[in-house]
Image (cartoon, coloured by chain):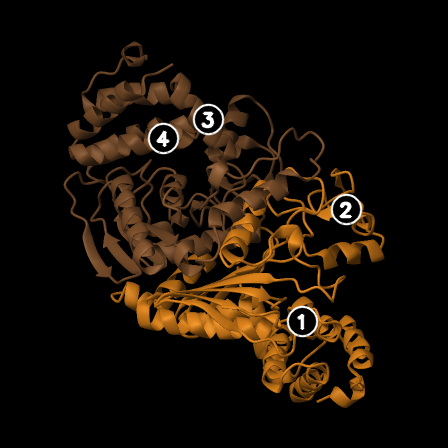
Chain colours: A orange, B brown
């Protein structure tokens, strides 16, 4: 088990060593460690490596200023100026919460941003304030939009959360591809084939060969044109609306750390207490969950989960027992150490 | 080819004969015929039969009053009082448009409503005013939420639209099931099997037998838990938030015309000109479409379509050449005639 405070301190040191402010580094560490605690390791500390690389290469600016481009009672647009994505997203979410509390609805758009971790972090922030929250982000093109044979759209993450009383929060957090690329890579490593519907080969044909991800293949949207259209919704609300880069103009920060992605985000907070003062949204969410859990289970299903329930259980366990990290994250932190010039020894991080 | 004015007049006569006001009947006719014109016959005039039945049986009230439960600069909640779903949805959409034009964002919730036709009608209304629009609705349970073995959630339709300049409007309009039940029924009629992933049998097992829809089977959400979670988002924003009925408490208007469904809707209009005055949203949507259309096409694909493009083309053709109706719609109108006591002869409707 790892010590959360020690990992947090390491993450902050590495980020400030390459130009992030102390406050930004602290926010990034908090958000990434929360993802690891929830078991969403793909969006946890494993990402520090990429953020450090981009800060070092200039694709992310440690001293960027956030500018409020527009600011109304129920909306705002922030230009992040090429900063890290996580701190500006926390700031935007706080602003959306504030607007929703005062005026019922708060929509805050961001452009000039970067990868912002797991969207679910921001919607849970809203749900914890009694609000229904939506969050979404553009990303570089890694998926074939419906009809195309190649990378043409991001897998544009989308999340919503609803306060659910005794059940905590419902938190749905997905990307638009059928599965995460990590699952494809894992199948390739283990010599397994993949189901049709996960990947297209370089000619745009459906394939069961996971190795196509190394040879010009591309990911398939979940549910075909339905997932593809949702990715376009995210592109519209987070990219078109904000004035961020669109589609192929979003730099791939993993392979092009020097170019700023000009990523866009959209955060929407909705205040049930103001819109419908006669009802208790959390009680009603409990009722929805209880109705669903009372149904007959499908064969092989041991428990009917609501979105985010598994992650919530993992969070509680991590808080009690300490944090587990997969080897891939530990290796990424070791590589980060070399880049940032801040030594990392796993044995120093135990708790 | 059918005459649009003649069909419209018929639809109005049938609805007013069973208690709808002239104004409401006119709105319902407009919205349903628009769906037929766009080729979305499942949500066109075929629905008049059900609306007439519910009006006659008392499940829908022709003289219901709409009440404004809450009304802020950027939000409102309307209680439809058991009225037809389409007129209150047009009213709510107009209100959302008005609020978005004045204050940047307009979220209007509706409860005490009924089936409201195709969600895309309302989002296109918003897009035609230069706004990005979202619309969604609850519905009676006809689909298995993730983990359940039986009907447990509606296939909760969801639409968004974006103004797209020379391309008209992007309009995405889906239900959360893998396919519409009509496709399953058609396969059963024709003795064909269906792909795994469309239906579960009465025990919750995946099946290729379309006949299960008559023997306690249920529909599968598109993309598995991803589509299931989106259906819960719609239930949250249109049902929980508005105070409408939830899940099994929504009456199935097709089989229970006497019970009011207490259906909920949610309409969200977002004003790009206010949130981001420096950018032209329609030009940027054109850019997104053009980027997507410029990609290599997948094998067998003749044209890369954006969401709603096919329906938009059909609308133009219908306006030019007259309206085509499937036999199922004509039969439904014949049955409607008997219920409403207003004669219907297809040959009188030609144009």
Q: How far apart are the two marked residues, 4 and 1, measured between alpha carbons?
A: 49 Å
Q: Chain of mark 4?
A: B
Q: Earlier in the sequence, mark 3 or mark 4?
A: 4
Quarter of the rendering occupied by the N terminus of chain B: top left
- The location of residue B80, given as percent across then percent down, is 22, 49
Residue underneath mark 2:
A217
Q: Check if mark 4's residue and mark 2's residue have beta carbons within 8 Å.
A: no
Q: Check if mark 2's residue and mark 1's residue have beta carbons within 8 Å.
A: no
In the image, are marks 4 and 2 on the same chain?
no
Check the image and report above or below for B35 versus B6: below
Pick the residue in front: B129 or B48.
B129
Q: Place residue B322 in its image quadrant.
A: top left
Check the image and report above or below for B101 versus A84: above
* Image disc number at residue A60: 1
- The location of residue A27, given as percent across then percent down, is 58, 80
Quarter of the rendering occupied by the C terminus of chain B: top left
- Which of labels 3 and 2 is toward the front? 3
Q: Secondary structure at mark 2?
A: loop
- The location of residue A351, given as percent across then percent down, is 70, 89
Q: How far apart are the two marked residues, 3 and 4, measured between alpha carbons?
A: 10 Å
Q: Chain of mark 2?
A: A
């Amino acid at each position: 088990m790892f010590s959360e405070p020690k990992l947090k301190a390491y993450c902050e040191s590495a980020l400030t060593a390459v130009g992030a402010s102390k406050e930004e580094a602290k926010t990034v560490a908090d958000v990434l460690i929360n993802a690891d605690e929830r078991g969403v390791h793909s969006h946890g500390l494993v990402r520090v490596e990429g953020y450090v690389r981009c800060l070092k290469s200039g694709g992310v600016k440690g001293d960027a200023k956030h500018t409020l481009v527009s600011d109304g009672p129920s909306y705002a647009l922030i230009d992040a100026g090429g900063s890290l994505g996580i701190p500006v997203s926390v700031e935007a979410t706080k602003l959306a919460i504030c607007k929703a509390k005062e005026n019922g609805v708060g929509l805050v758009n961001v452009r000039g941003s970067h990868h912002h971790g797991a969207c679910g972090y921001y919607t849970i922030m809203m749900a914890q304030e009694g609000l229904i929250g939506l969050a979404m982000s553009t990303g570089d093109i890694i998926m074939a939009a419906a009809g195309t044979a190649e990378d043409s759209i991001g897998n544009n993450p989308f999340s919503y959360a609803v306060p659910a009383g005794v059940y905590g929060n419902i938190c749905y957090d997905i990307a638009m591809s059928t599965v995460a690329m990590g699952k494809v890579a894992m199948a390739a490593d283990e010599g397994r084939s993949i189901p049709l519907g996960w990947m297209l080969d370089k000619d745009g044909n459906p394939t069961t060969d996971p190795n196509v991800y190394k040879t010009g293949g591309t990911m398939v949207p979940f549910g075909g044109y339905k997932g593809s259209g949702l990715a376009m919704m995210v592109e519209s609300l987070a990219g078109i609306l904000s004035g961020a880069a669109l589609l192929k103009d979003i730099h791939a920060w993993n392979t092009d750390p020097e170019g700023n992605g000009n990523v866009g985000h959209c955060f929407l907070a909705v205040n049930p207490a103001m819109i419908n003062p006669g009802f208790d949204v959390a009680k009603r969410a409990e009722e929805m969950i209880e109705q669903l859990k009372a149904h007959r289970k499908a064969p092989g299903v041991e428990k009917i989960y609501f979105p985010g329930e598994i992650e919530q259980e993992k969070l509680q366990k991590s808080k009690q027992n300490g944090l587990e990290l997969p080897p891939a994250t530990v290796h990424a932190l070791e590589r980060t150490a070399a880049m940032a010039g801040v030594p990392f020894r796993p044995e120093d991080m135990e708790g």
